[in-house]
Amino acid sequence: MISGQRISTIEGAASFLLNITPTSVVLTQFQSEFTLNVSLDPSASHLRLTFATALGGTVQTSTNLFDWSNLEQAPAQTVGDQTEVELPIDLAEPQRFYRLYR
C-alpha cells in the first residue's frame, strides 16, 4: 500500500484515501460507491432509477422518510453493469422518496 492511494472496502461499496506516516495509518475522504441515480423524463411521465448491479441492493420507497417499503411493482432490467427501474409519475401524489437499501 502506498500513502495517498485510494483503497476499496472488501465488498467494493466504498473507498478511503490511505495516509501513512511513521507513527500512524489514517483513512480519510470516505466515498460511497453505493449510489442511486435518478433521471426524469417529463415527456414520458416517468422516473428512471439506475444503480450498479454488482453492488446489489433493493430500491425502497416512502412518502414520509420514516416508513420504507421495497419497490416491487416495477420490473428491473440489467443494462450493461447497471440495473434500471422505470417508474410512472403519479401527478396526484404530493411527494415520494426513493433510496437504495442493502
Image (cartoon, rainbow, N blue to C red):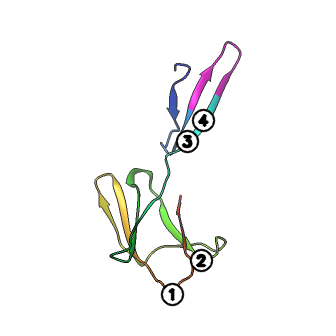
Q: Residues within 10 Å of mark 3 (few under 14, many from 20)?
A: few
Magenta: predominant secondary structure element?
strand
Q: Who is closer to the viewer here, 4 or 95? A: 95
Question: What residue is shown with label 3?
Answer: 31
Question: What residue is shown with label 1?
Answer: 92
Residue 29 in the image: x percent, y percent? 60, 35
Residue type pointed to by label 2:
Thr
Question: What residue is shown with label 2?
Answer: 63
Mark 3 and mark 4: Cα distance apart in space? 6 Å
Q: Residues within 10 Å of mark 4 (few under 14, many from 20)?
A: few
Q: Nearer the viewer, mark 1 or mark 2?
A: 1
Which range of residues does the magenta coloring cover?
A: 17-26
Residue 7 in the image: x percent, y percent? 51, 31
Q: Which mark is residue 29?
A: 4
Element on which disc 3 rests: strand
Residue 2 in the image: x percent, y percent? 52, 19
Mark 2 and mark 3: Cα distance apart in space? 27 Å
